[in-house]
Amino acid sequence: MKSTEAKSTKRGFVMTGGGAKGLFEAGVIHAFHLCGLEFDVITGSSIGAINSIVYAEYQWLKRHLPAETLADPMKTIEAMDPYVWASLHAWWDLPRMNIIDDSATGPIGLLKDDLLGLDIGLPSIVRLIWWYTDPNNDLVPDLAVLADISRIINELPERLAGGQGVLETWKRWRDDKLNPFDAAVRTYLNRFGMEHALVPDDKADNLRQFFTQSIVPLRREHLDDPAAVLPEIKPVPLIPPDRTLRDYRESGVEVRMTRTNFRTGRLEVSSYNSAEQFAAFLKKHWYRFDNKEGFLPALGNARLQTIGNPNAINAALASGRFPGVFSPMPIDKIYDLTEAEDTANVLFSGLLASWLNDEAVRSALQHPDGDGTEPKVSVSDELLRTWQESEELARLFPRTGDHYVDGGAIDNMPTNSAIDAIKDWIDENNAGNRDVQLDLYTVFLHPPPDPGELVTEMIPSSVETVQRTLEIKNAAVLDSDAAHVRFVNKTAQLAEDTSRTIISLATALEEILAKVPDSPSLQLSEEQKVTLKAAVEAQVSAVLPARKDKDIAGRLAGIKDQYEKIIDEKLPLHVNPIEIHPEEMPMRTLQFTERLGFRKENAVRMITSGCYSTLWSLHEYLSDKLENSPDERDEQALRLAKHWMGLDMAEMPSDKAALRKAWRCSRV
């Protein structure tokens, strides 16, 4: 237990989902690079998961630089520049990734051509829908509706590629027990390779190849011509294909990425966990999932973790498996279950196949070191048997054949995963919850939540009403989340201060009882000392909780132990939220190609906005924090931020609002 001033700082970096809007996060990464900021935990969801491993790889590479380079912040930045600019080049090449093939010969283009040949007009479609949904319609439709039905029947064989397609539809209806409409839709989409997803699996694998490639750092020439070839510049590898989350853990950064289990509908976390860490997770949370009454945690509150060592790039891509655009990713693609040397994944393979009925898994949970030594996390035979026999636990945890979709479907802002990681660190290091504070840098892919005041004399249209209501709703939800963190921090700090006051009072009473009667300054006789001591003990005893089995000294010690335990174990971790917002968001989620809305000028604005928004947020937060809490790493980050903002080279306004408008990036 430490005093408020003595709390050590842990740093977390949270990146949210948003598809092509992840360009903003690339700019944030560049700013953190310029300021030399490193994190203890990095979490991401969807596109934020991919950016998470980009920065985790950055930290891995940085920590393997020579000591003489790391001793000089500017030399370190220069050494890491090529990697950061290579990652920016990858984002700049977004349209050339060809994630969604919208060319004339691609699936979307072929679907468009086929629909243009459809001999059914909009009036016919509207008439059919209106007739079908009319509760008072006759079983025999009128002539116009009959004509429309006749057109659909005539069109059906051509849309389904002739008799073969009609036969396939019939087989799907008969064998797969699909209703005729679903069977026909599946058959139709299958003509264009789009039955399971907009992007076929072989095409989706291009993303893995793209982010594991070597690419030259971004240069001015690429802004004018993305295909520019610069042979004098050496390509830089982005993410090694065999990089795992254990590699990052061993280099000092915890990476956690969300994923949604398609079978259970539960949120899971891709992270490296040894057998001992999995045992700790089960011991802490199993009772929440083994509820016989069916009262399980909310879908987004579970954050299930399991033993295993995920492949970094595949775990990130699984988190970004946008529904409908990509098909769900199988579990055996996230974890390499064929690598016999990877103990964590060998055990995970057994867990998938038979839960805790696998002898090797059970043994590893009780004896993770395999040598009979006493583990840090003790699991009794009875507790292990309870887990093993729990049908609910076996159902909720991953199984062979499970598939995963976008983690952002449940948790698009994985701040809780970052907090969980720090809590796990606290438990593993026998620290207290209030010994540590977490600076949590969270990137949002929307402007700050403020619907503004609407001043108009016009009655809004129905569309404007819906749009305005959604703006208010979204702002209220986001503002409520921030207010909740502030409330928890304030309440916990009040409880900590109160507990420390009680501990101080108990300590003071101990000193009074020990010193006052014998104090030479009082010049008391032995009889007076005995009388005074008895009187003081009587007064102290009267205000203390009654304990027949302990004397006053024992009761005071018990009070101190009780409140120290409250501080260390009962109070929540103190979280300092640092929000990074764009001032505007000109891009949309699926703008991966120019046809879908990707524009080079918007990409430049997003990367630039990410950088300057982060520099300002860093300057604003650290300037205030360092007035009361000196920290060497924070001081260096602020010093570098001021340098790149030009605040150390020119006179600037003292007013914050004026300063925010006046500063300019000094890096050219």
Image (cartoon, rainbow, N blue to C red):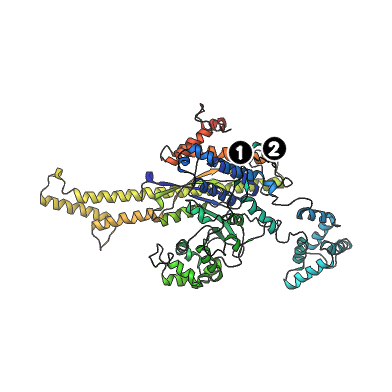
Q: Which mark is residue 224?
A: 2
Q: Which of 358 and 412 is in front in this view?
A: 358
> Is residue 107 visible from the viewing direction of this image?
yes
Q: Residue 259 at what x, y percent from top left?
A: 58, 58
Among the 4 quarters of the image, the one containing residue 380: bottom left
Q: Describe residue 86's horizontal placement relative to residue 306 as left or right.
A: right
Q: Nearer the viewer, mark 2 or mark 1?
A: 2
Disc 2 to disc 1: CB gap under 8 Å: no
Of labels 2 and 1, earlier in sequence is 2
Q: Residue lying furthest front in this view?
A: 232
Q: Relative to 613, is 161 above or below?
A: below
Q: Residue 316 at what x, y percent from top left?
A: 59, 54
Q: Which of 3 and 351 is in front in this view?
A: 351
Secondary element at image label 1 = helix
Q: Residue 266 at what x, y percent from top left?
A: 57, 62
Identify the residue shown where x is 39% and y is 46%. 7
Q: How far apart are marks 2 and 1 (CA)?
A: 17 Å
| Quadrant of the image containing the C terminus | top right
- Residue at label 1? 608
> Are there few (<14), some (14-19), or many (20+) residues within 10 Å of tag 1?
many
> Are there few (<14), some (14-19), or many (20+) residues within 10 Å of tag 2?
few
Identify the residue shown where x is 12% and y is 47%. 524
For badge 2, the amino acid type reads: Asp
For badge 1, the amino acid type reads: Thr
Q: Describe residue 326's horizontal placement relative to residue 160 as left or right.
A: left
> Is residue 28 visible from the viewing direction of this image?
no
